[in-house]
């Protein structure tokens, strides 16, 4: 009786239904937000006569600029594993500094001073969080109160205006630019494109994800975790300062109460876009899509004449769904 000595190759295990569901869920998070955006665009295009007009589209992108910048800064911080609740306070204080410096020098110098101020405020925020060792949520909440207080002290609680002679130039970010878009929109697109490349294509970006995914493992591998966090806060500060300049340019003034609470909307846009609230996962393009989606919902409610109370309910449900989906995916991937 002969014996078959041919080596037997073990059959590859068939993919489980659970694994297939996990892959499907991850793809839904990757592309579901884009699909939702497309569906809303189609629905508004069919239900209103004004949505696809050039005026409304230019206005939509212009409205997205401020939230998009803040959401981009929030996304970079969240990817690295921290939160920045100083964004709106940094926005206000930077804009006030820009106006005040512009009054004694020049509008362009004032704008540059606002951006530098945003970077410095981000550096201070990051240093406070890193050196104190407190949770970033608590640390940045306390720091934001300090910045708001400084804004009130600098202005005396009043609205600050540029000099009459330079008032026209101060509104330069509202001027029509390429393809009829405002200068603010062009600036927003350029800044977001640069940051998207930095996060996805550079060593700093890889370290950003490593720190957010596992800070201790990143530290043991030689990455300076504190420096990465401080840099993330500085980028968020610059984004906040640019957003502040857009708002100040539109209003022709700056005040200490500018954009109060908008940092939470920015974090919401980042989360709705698919950035993991636990850090280590996300992308700048997600922030852009999330900001566009939230702005689009507001624009649609205005065009359709719906009560804005329901807008808040819808946004809240979107955030809850995004966070729940992220938590479920985390569990499935273990």
Image (cartoon, helix red, strand yellow):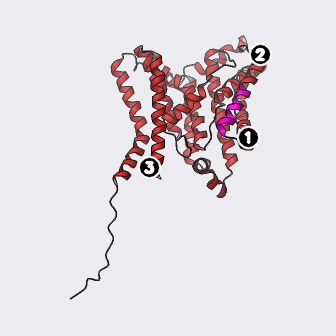
User: Badges 1 and 2: C-beta atoms under 8 Å apart?
Assistant: no
In-front residue for pair 219/201: 219
Please tell me which residue is depicted at 68% across the width and 23% down the height of the picture: 92
For the image, the number of numbered tags is: 3
- How much space separates mark 1 and mark 2, taking CA atoms? 28 Å
Q: Which segment is the magenta one? A: 133-147
Residue 107: say if magenta: no
Please tell me whether the stretch drawn in magenta is mainly helix, strand or loop.
helix
Q: Secondary structure at mark 3?
A: helix
Quarter of the rendering containing residue 38: top left
Residue 112 shows up from this direction: yes
In-front residue for pair 135/210: 135
Please tell me which residue is depicted at 60% across the width and 17% down the height of the picture: 250
Q: Is residue 44 above or below residue 239?
A: above
Q: Earlier in the sequence, mark 1 or mark 3?
A: 1
Q: Give the residue number, with chain letter if any, for mark 3.
A: 332
Q: Secondary structure at mark 1?
A: helix
Residue 54 shows up from this direction: no
Q: Give the residue number, with chain letter if any, for mark 1.
A: 127
Please tell me which residue is depicted at 69% across the width and 42% down the height of the picture: 230
Is 123 displayed left or right of 4 in the figure?
right
Categorize mark 1 by other alpha carbons within 10 Å: few (<14), some (14-19), many (20+).
Answer: some
Q: Is residue 180 above or below residue 1?
A: above
Quarter of the rendering containing residue 247: top right
Q: Secondary structure at mark 2?
A: loop
Q: Give the residue number, with chain letter if any, for mark 2.
A: 156
Q: Earlier in the sequence, mark 1 or mark 2?
A: 1
- How much space separates mark 1 and mark 3, taking CA atoms? 36 Å
- How much space separates mark 3 and mark 2, taking CA atoms? 53 Å
Q: Residue furthest bottom?
A: 1
Q: Residue furthest left?
A: 1
């Amino acid at each position: 009786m002969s014996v078959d000595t041919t080596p037997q190759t073990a059959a590859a295990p068939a993919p489980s239904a659970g694994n297939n569901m996990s892959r499907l869920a991850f793809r839904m998070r990757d592309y579901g937000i884009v699909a939702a955006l497309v569906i809303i665009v189609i629905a508004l295009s069919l239900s209103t006569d004004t949505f696809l007009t050039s005026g409304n589209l230019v206005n939509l992108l212009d409205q997205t600029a401020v939230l998009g910048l803040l959401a981009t800064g929030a996304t970079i911080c969240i990817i690295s594993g921290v939160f920045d609740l100083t964004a709106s306070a940094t926005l206000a204080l930077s804009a006030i500094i820009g106006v005040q410096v512009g009054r004694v020098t020049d509008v362009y110098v004032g704008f540059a001073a606002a951006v530098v101020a945003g970077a410095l405020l981000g550096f201070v925020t990051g240093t406070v969080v890193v050196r104190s060792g407190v949770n970033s949520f608590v640390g940045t909440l306390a720091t934001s109160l300090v910045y708001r207080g400084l804004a009130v002290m600098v202005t005396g609680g009043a609205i600050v205006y540029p000099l009459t002679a330079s008032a026209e130039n101060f509104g330069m970010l509202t001027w029509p630019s390429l393809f009829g878009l405002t200068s603010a929109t062009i600036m927003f697109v350029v800044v977001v494109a640069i940051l998207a490349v930095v996060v996805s294509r550079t060593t700093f970006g890889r370290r950003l994800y490593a720190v957010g995914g596992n800070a201790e493992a990143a530290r043991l591998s030689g990455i300076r975790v504190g420096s990465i966090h401080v840099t993330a806060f500085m980028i968020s500060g610059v984004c906040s300062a640019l957003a502040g300049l857009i708002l100040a340019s539109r209003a022709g003034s700056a005040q200490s109460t500018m954009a109060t609470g908008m940092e939470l909307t920015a974090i919401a846009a980042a989360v709705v876009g698919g950035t993991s609230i636990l850090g280590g996962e996300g992308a700048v393009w997600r922030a852009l899509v999330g900001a566009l989606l939230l702005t689009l919902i507001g624009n649609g409610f205005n065009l359709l004449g719906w009560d804005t109370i329901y807008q808040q309910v819808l946004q809240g449900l979107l955030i809850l769904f995004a966070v729940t989906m992220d938590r479920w995916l985390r569990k499935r991937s273990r």
